[in-house]
Each structure stands twice: as C-alpha cells, then as structure tokens.
Amino acid sequence: MALGSIWGVGGGTYISRLLGVKEKERIKGAALSFVISNLCSLMYYVWYLQKNSQNIDLSYKYFLWDKQIIKEVFGIGISDFLMTSFLIVSSLLLNNFVVHYGDDVIVAFGVSLRIVQLPEFLCMGLFMGITPLIGYSYGAKNKERLQSAMKQTAAAIALIVCVFSSLVYIFRKEVLTWFTSSDGLIGIGIYILSVMLISTIFNGFTGLITSYFQATDKAKQALIMSISQGTLFIPTIIIANALLGLHGIIFSMTIAEFLTFLLGIFLYFYKKNSKFSGETAICE
C-alpha cells in the first residue's frame, strides 16, 4: 500500500511541477495533479492485485450482492469512511480560507501538503500493515508479541519521521525550488512547509493508536479517533483565522494533529485505567 501511495504522490507532485510553472495554470495544475495522483495509485493497486494476489481476482464475475459481506465491510470500514469524509470537508474549508490570500499561498499549501504526505504514507503502511498482527496477538492473548510489534512499529515511525522531517527542514528551500522558481512562492512555502513538518511528528503515532483500537475490538475509541481530526480541525481553523489570519490558518492543521494525538493518548490511558486495565497497552 505504501508503494502505491508513494507512486501516486510522486506522480502528482511531478505533474504539479510541470503544470505549476505557468502562473495562470497553478490552481488548475494543482487540482489536476491531485486527480492524476489518485488515478496512478488506483492503477498500481489494480495491477499489483491482479498480478500477485492468489486470493483476490478483480474480474466483474466475482462481484456479488451479499448482505452479510456488505454488513461486514461497512462494519469495519465505517470509521475510515467517516475519517475520509471529514478530511474532504476539512480540505474544502482550508481551500475556502486560503483562496483569499492569493495564488502563491494556495500553491505553497498544495506543494507542502504533498511533501509531508510522503512520510505520512510510509507510516501509514507500517501501522496499517501491523493491524492484523495486533489483532492476532490480542486474540491469542500473546502479550509479549503484541508489545514487541508495537514497540518496533513505533520505533520505525519515529525514525522515518525524524530522518525525513530533519532533512526536508534543513534543505526546505532547495526542495521547494524543485516545484517553482518564484521567489514569492518559495518564501511563503518555506514558512508553510516548516510548520507542516511539525504535524508529521504526531500523525504517525495517531495512526498507530487508531490501528490499535481497531485491531483490539475497541470500536468506539476507533470511531472517535477516526472523526476527531476533522471535527477538531474545523473549529481550530475558524478560530485561528479569526484571531491570527494567515498565520492561524498555517498553524491550524498542526494544532489539530496535536490535539488528535493528545485525544488518542487520553482514550488509551482512560481505557487502561478502567475495568479493562488488564489489557495490553501500547506504551508498556
């Protein structure tokens, strides 16, 4: 999954670079690159499954309308569906605020977001990939294996975030010159990218906590975590914009990520200290 996401982000950012060169086509190019990046990811997943999977065949003859299957799919996927829905609303709200500050700010947000998505998608591959192992270890009451898996995954996420964010922060100006030669865009882009890099510290661990809740049959906590980022981001950006203008908008995403991370920690330790305190903990 991580390779598919990287393929999509890489294709999208490359198209952004090509289409964002012309001043009048920046917004159109950014929108088109987003669509193309998702198409690139989709084509990669279809190709990979058809070529390598022994259990999955995407031929239309295998598409069946089975109520039990549909119920199970929606039961598992509703939290991710709500998370995606809130993220779409959040993106629309962000664009609605940013558009008042000019094309340079819009393009800088788009480029910075794509850059910080690279470590986020790598971390996503880790915490989504570890979910079945967490569920199996939890069901088998294999506390030692669960702890080992969580510690190694957390360490890998920390390493990816620290290495990537540090390198991009040090060479942030050089990185932005890959996408534009405009001094004004690079100037605001450095500011936006620097702030967004902070959010990568919290995003990976938030995803790991959410995966833990999903794998250990804590549906309520998983649902809260899935919708919290969007629900926290909306009031955050409205208040931050009213108080600080553009500076508030730039910091709003990082603040929302931090609050979501704190919420995850709270939910985890609240559960740990309740009647289920004997269950395995992430940070034990």
Image: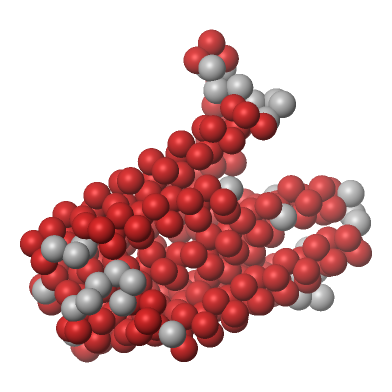
Identify the residue at horizontal 53%, vertical 38% (top origin): 45
Identify the residue at horizontal 70%, vertical 26% (top origin): 55
Is residue 236 in view from this perspective?
no
Quadrant assignment for the C terminus: bottom right
Q: Does 249 sit above or below residue 115?
A: below
Identify the residue at horizontal 80%, vertical 63% (top origin): 149
Residue 8: image x %, image y %?
44, 50
**Residue nearest the observer in this picture, 106 or 282:** 106
Residue 156: image x %, image y %?
70, 70
Q: Does 209 sit above or below residue 79?
A: below
Q: Residue furthest top?
A: 61
Residue 223: image x %, image y %?
54, 54
Quarter of the figure with residue 179? bottom left
Quarter of the figure with residue 98? bottom left
Q: Residue furthest left?
A: 24
Is residue 26 in view from this perspective?
yes
Q: Does 10 sit above or below residue 70?
A: below
Q: Does 77 sit above or below residue 163?
A: above
Residue 183: image x %, image y %?
19, 84
Identify the residue at horizontal 20%, vertical 69% (top origin): 106
Q: Is residue 112 left or right of residue 212?
A: left
Q: Is residue 271 left or right of residue 84?
A: right
